Image: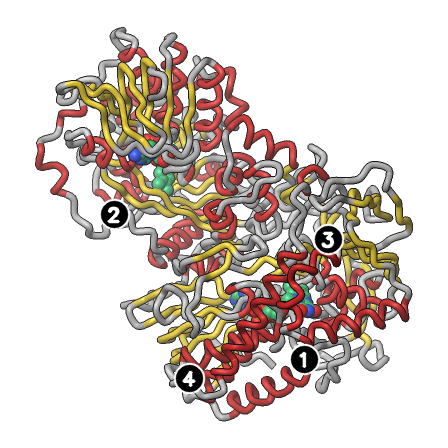
């Protein structure tokens, strides 16, 4: 399935990511006449939103449990056609660990997502892509807030549960509690129920009333309302309780999750005394507090950034999705978390522009649709904020950095005693964010803790947490064999 | 106007932190300013070795020895705060010619009192079981040690504030207050700060700061990359570096200061350092540097070939043309003092630098003469003599 | 990535795949991730953390958190959520530390 791609590949346009944004960008660029290379960490196209079972076992997925599957089928058919005609070179199963700006454009260096073991009998290596223009569509991942017990096995990212179902066709457990904030909790719970799991509750820290000021923006995107109705029906059919202004205050269990303690909160996220409740016999707890865009590649190339309405660091782009670095385009979550439909529109725009093609007429309505989706996304972010008082939920011994096992107490001590108010300095002093995941999971929380209770982290602190000079672990043997492409 | 103090330290890297700490120990009132947070400059982008093994006979070796005494003496009670480890350093030779050079260096170092033991191949493999099979022998330096440099800076600032100093973050100095020739304080966006003595501890930026006072202090940046591996069980037990680099510079002098170091850290990662290149303040990642580091690491420890790097970082060593720091009073601008330009040894030298400077600030004659480090020792042409050519890394 | 091994299936049941976890055979179906194979066999944790030896398994599910590391066919520190199983795959948790494969002491390098 994966075309082995040793050595160096040259192209007009390199696209990183084959999710909604990347697929659309690749197709648009190729159809505009460009030679395109698409690099994706996953083994097959789809990204997070259109993740599906391996095509080796399910060659013709029916799209059950998916939204916008028709769009995917259309993009995929065009993607495959362009591969067939040689316009698109597809490099799956490779992670980009570094992107550089060079005289000729951009160099993208990759390493296998999975290392073939010495006893596996297969060999693999990385590749180098040199392209005049680069479109980065690396998407994002679930944003997390630590809470006592969240490091127990059985606790997962809400999106991770969904990815498990979409990718494997099964469930990671039997009895689930889903908690956090945002409309994304609904498809996760619905997916679990449709796959045969029992959802004991969906706990939403916000309240639907938070939407009232934003109804106009919401009305601009009627398909979201339809999705909501659909989930409502699934929730009713499976009797899934949806509790608002409710959070998990603790995951219970010693060696794995066995239950959760919950409480009602006020509008700031402060726990209301006497509202505690315990759910037992829970084997999977899913948390999602929105998404964090994967900013390391854009940041390493030096793009201008801003803070989005959800508090995420995102790249600044023009109407054509071009970043502050000429020739570097961004699409999808890295320009602001806004859902797959917006990601596709942005991808089409970016791909067309990266191919240096004049904008076709079709892109003009695209612009208006993008604006509508962005207004909706902003309304969603404002209605589902990270609760201001979330830091109060932590105990001093609560793990914040899962990799290096750094506790909330250690972080607040470094902040208060050593003056570490930024994520980068906290990392230097406590090692939070220094481990395998390089702060992807704890970065946002650490930046908030550095800013102090109730305060929002500065953009400098968020950038400090998001800078990762290596965008993926890479073999030292591979590095020793590097070739310079700018000679 | 902020309250006046005896001493105003600009820069909260290891050098400023040590200076502030020892000044409070002298009973002086101290204010510390930094444009960012503590340890946000080069002190958070280095390796934390305190090395005797790479020093040649001269003022730097004396300062290193003095500094080691301070680490083991005045600062001993705080060792645990900054993960002080006396683990010793090993230089490895994998070619006959470099073994010969190493033997020469060892002999001369032993002659001026550096403790060093010869390691035959068996000793070497006992000390470092995963060392390259090519290794022909080595030298062990028991005095070499290691600290976590960010924690040194952070805790010394904290200890200084506990002793009465005031630390003000996010306060870039933009100019000096003068009374005639005399420097009497600094200007910042948070208002003016006045002091009896202003100490320039701004590391790589010390030249820029000095220029604001109208004096030239030729401190320049020399970039260095360090590669960090995935966390592993203990595989490397000392600081280990290759003697081939003595060869590269042809003789025993100065050469060892440019050695690559491979070492384990208490958290399980292995640091592979470090390159040296003069490229100004260029932050662009260099694939050449990464390749060199990776190659060097694998040549010392072949198992590293199958290990993953999870990050790398780089910093800018503050260096002077004669590779010695500037420490002391600047008679060209009375009231202004400098402690900067410690190049690739600032962590190790910080303890001694801070203590000596504090003695001088308190009007005592310092334990070690500061004359070799005099700020005005350079001619005015020094600043222009730097090239932007990339030089051999490592 | 991992080869499609549906043709190489000694157990006989179509789509069934047998792998080993810490030496003990477990069955799963083709197309599963290692993480899914383990979890659906009741193994929810397969790694102990370095500092406090706490158990870990799947968390992010998409290759971001590195909580789910396993040794696969001798390659240490692979993300269980990303590796697809194949018949005969040897999976090891990290009850023993993940020592990287050591080079043979033969020399011969430049
Ligand atoms: C687990 C998960 C589930 C989600 N489910 C939903 C949902 O049900 N409904 C909804 O509205 N939104 C969902 N989202 C949000 C969703 O990601 C976006 O709406 C949409 O998928 C964004 O598209 P994208 O193309 O920007 O990113 P993605 O779909 O995330 O695609 C990014 C692609 O880039 C690849 N990539 C990233 N970094 C690299 C690299 N360094 N090298 C190579 N490849 C790389 C990734 O492997 C991925 O294939 C989900 C998000 C996550 C994380
Ligand atoms: C890759 C690498 C490896 C190294 N390895 C070692 C090693 O193993 N052992 C060793 O001893 N040394 C090592 N070094 C050298 C060591 O890091 C430096 O010598 C040392 O950190 C210098 O400390 P400093 O306090 O002078 O400078 P810095 O740590 O840079 O501190 C200067 C401070 O001044 C502040 N500042 C600058 N301008 C202003 C202004 N206008 N106003 C206010 N504040 C300002 C900055 O914000 C900064 O915090 C290494 C260096 C590098 C780059
Ligand atoms: S579960 Fe996070 S990387 Fe596999």
- Mark 3 → mark 1, Cα distance in angstroms: 27 Å
Chain of the residue where label 3 is placed in the rendered structure: A
Q: Nearer the viewer, mark 1 or mark 2?
A: 1
Residue that carries the numbered disc 1 in the rendered image: A68
Q: CA distance from mark 2 to mark 4?
A: 41 Å
Residue on which the image places disc 2: B280
Asked whether the residues under marks 3 and 4 belong to the same chain, the reply is: yes
For the residues bearing labels 1 and 2, Cβ distance under 8 angstroms: no
Q: Residues within 10 Å of mark 2 (few under 14, many from 20)?
A: some
Residue marked by disc 3: A206
The percent position of residue A432, horizontal first and vertical second, equals 57, 41
In front of the other: A206 or A395: A206
* Pointers 4 and 1 within a single chain: yes
The residue where tag 4 is placed is: A359
Q: Quadrant of the N terminus of chain B?
A: top left
Report the Cα–Cα distance between label 3 and label 4: 41 Å
Which of disc 1 and disc 3 is earlier in sequence?
1
Nearer-N-terminus badge (4/1)? 1
Residue B98 visible in the shown view: yes
Residue B345 picture location, percent across and down: 33, 31
Judge whether B5 appears above or below B256 on screen. above
Q: Residue at x 82, y 76 (%)?
A: C16
Residue at horizontal 34 percent and vertical 45 percent from the top:
B224
Q: Are marks 2 and 4 on the same chain?
A: no
Above or below, B161 against C61 in this view is above
> Which label number is shown at residue A353?
none
Q: Chain of mark 1?
A: A
Q: Secondary structure at mark 4?
A: loop
- Of the four image quadrants, the one with ligand 2 is top left
Residue B51 placement: quadrant: top left
**Residue B111 appears in the rendering:** no
């Amino acid at each position: 399935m994966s075309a082995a791609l040793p050595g160096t590949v040259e192209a007009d346009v390199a696209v990183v990511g084959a999710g909604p944004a990347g697929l659309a960008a690749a197709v648009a660029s190729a159809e505009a006449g460009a030679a395109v290379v698409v690099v994706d960490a996953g083994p097959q196209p789809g990204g997070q939103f259109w993740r599906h079972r391996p095509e080796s076992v399910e060659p013709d997925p029916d799209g059950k449990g998916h939204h916008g599957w028709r769009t995917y089928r259309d993009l995929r058919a065009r993607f495959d056609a362009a591969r067939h005609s040689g316009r698109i070179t597809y490099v799956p199963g490779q992670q980009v660990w570094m992107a550089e700006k060079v005289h000729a454009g951009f160099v993208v260096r990759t390493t296998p997502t999975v290392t073939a073991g010495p006893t596996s009998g297969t060999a693999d290596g990385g590749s180098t892509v040199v392209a005049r223009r680069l479109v980065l569509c690396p998407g994002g991942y679930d944003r997390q807030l630590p809470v006592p017990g969240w490091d127990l096995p059985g606790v997962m990212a809400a999106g991770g549960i969904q990815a498990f179902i979409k990718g494997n066709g099964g469930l990671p457990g039997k009895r689930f509690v889903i908690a956090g904030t945002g409309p994304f909790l609904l498809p996760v719970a619905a997916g679990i129920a449709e796959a045969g799991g029992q959802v004991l509750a969906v706990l939403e820290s916000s309240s639907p009333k938070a939407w009232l000021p934003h109804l106009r923006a919401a009305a601009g995107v009627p398909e979201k309302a339809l999705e909501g109705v659909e989930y409502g029906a699934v929730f009713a059919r499976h009797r899934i309780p949806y509790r608002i202004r409710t959070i998990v205050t603790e995951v219970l269990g010693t060696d794995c999750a066995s239950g959760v303690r919950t409480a009602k909160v006020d509008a700031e996220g402060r726990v209301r005394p006497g509202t505690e409740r315990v759910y037992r016999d829970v084997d999977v707890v899913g948390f999602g507090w929105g998404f964090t865009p994967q900013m390391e590649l854009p940041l390493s190339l030096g793009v201008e950034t801003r803070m989005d309405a959800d508090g995420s660091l995102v790249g600044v782009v023009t109407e054509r999705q071009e970043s502050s670095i000429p020739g570097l385009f961004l699409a999808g979550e890295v320009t602001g978390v806004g859902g797959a439909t917006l990601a596709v529109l942005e991808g089409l725009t970016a791909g067309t522009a990266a191919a240096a093609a004049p904008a076709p007429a079709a892109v003009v309505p695209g612009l208006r649709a993008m604006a509508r989706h962005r207004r909706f996304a902003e309304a969603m972010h404002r209605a589902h904020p990270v609760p201001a008082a979330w830091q109060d939920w932590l105990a001093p011994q609560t793990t914040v950095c899962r990799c290096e096992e750094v506790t909330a107490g250690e972080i607040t001590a470094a902040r208060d005693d050593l003056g570490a108010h930024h994520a980068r300095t906290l990392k230097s002093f406590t090692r939070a964010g220094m481990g395998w995941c390089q702060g992807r999971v704890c970065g946002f929380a650490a930046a908030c803790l550095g800013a102090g209770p109730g305060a929002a982290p500065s953009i400098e602190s968020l950038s400090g947490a998001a800078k990762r000079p290596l965008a993926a672990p890479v073999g030292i043997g591979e590095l020793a064999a590097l070739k310079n492409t700018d000679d | 106007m902020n309250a006046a103090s005896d001493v105003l330290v600009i820069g909260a890297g290891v050098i400023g932190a040590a200076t502030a700490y020892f000044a409070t120990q002298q009973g002086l009132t101290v204010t510390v300013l930094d444009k960012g947070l503590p340890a946000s400059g080069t002190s958070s982008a280095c390796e934390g070795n305190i090395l005797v093994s790479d020093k040649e006979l001269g003022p730097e070796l004396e300062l290193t020895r003095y500094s080691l005494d301070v680490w083991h003496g005045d600062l001993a009670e705080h060792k645990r705060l900054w993960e002080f480890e006396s683990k010793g350093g090993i230089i490895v030779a994998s070619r006959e010619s470099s073994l010969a050079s190493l033997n020469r260096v060892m002999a001369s170092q032993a002659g001026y009192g550096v403790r060093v033991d010869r390691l035959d191949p068996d000793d070497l493999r006992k000390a470092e079981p995963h060392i390259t099979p090519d290794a022909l022998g080595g030298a062990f330096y028991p005095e070499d040690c290691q600290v976590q440099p960010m924690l040194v800076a952070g805790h010394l600032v904290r200890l200084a504030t506990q002793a009465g100093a005031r630390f003000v973050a996010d306060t870039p100095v933009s100019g000096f207050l003068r009374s005639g020739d005399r420097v009497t304080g600094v200007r910042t966006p948070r208002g003016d700060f006045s002091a009896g003595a202003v100490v320039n501890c701004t590391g790589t930026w010390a030249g820029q700061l000095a220029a604001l006072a109208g004096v030239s202090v030729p401190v320049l940046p020399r970039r260095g990359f360090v590669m960090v591996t995935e966390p592993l069980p203990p595989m490397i037990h000392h600081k280990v570096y290759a003697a081939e680099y003595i060869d590269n510079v042809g003789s025993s002098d100065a050469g060892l200061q440019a050695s690559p170091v491979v070492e384990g850290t208490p958290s399980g990662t292995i640091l592979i350092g470090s390159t040296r290149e003069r490229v100004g303040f260029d932050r662009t990642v260099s694939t050449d540097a990464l390749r060199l580091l990776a190659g060097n690491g694998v040549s010392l420890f072949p198992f590293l070939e199958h290990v993953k790097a999870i990050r790398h970082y780089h910093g800018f060593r503050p260096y002077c043309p004669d590779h010695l720091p500037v420490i002391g009073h600047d008679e060209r601008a009375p009231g202004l003092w400098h402690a900067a330009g410690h190049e690739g040894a600032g962590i190790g030298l910080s303890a001694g630098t801070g203590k000596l400077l504090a003695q001088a600030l308190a009007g005592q004659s310092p334990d070690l003469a500061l004359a070799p480090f005099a700020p005005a020792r350079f001619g005015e042409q020094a600043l222009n003599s730097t090239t932007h050519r990339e030089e051999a890394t490592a | 990535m991992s080869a499609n091994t549906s043709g190489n299936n000694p157990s006989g049941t179509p789509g069934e795949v047998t792998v080993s976890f810490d030496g003990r055979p477990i069955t799963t179906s083709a197309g599963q991730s290692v993480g899914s194979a383990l979890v659906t066999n009741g193994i929810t944790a397969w790694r102990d953390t370095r500092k406090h030896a706490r158990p870990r398994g799947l968390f992010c599910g998409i290759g971001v958190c590195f909580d789910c590391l396993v040794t696969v066919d001798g390659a240490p520190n692979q993300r269980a959520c990303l590796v697809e199983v194949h018949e005969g795959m040897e999976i090891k948790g990290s009850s023993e530390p993940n020592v990287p494969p050591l080079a043979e002491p033969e020399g011969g390098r430049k």
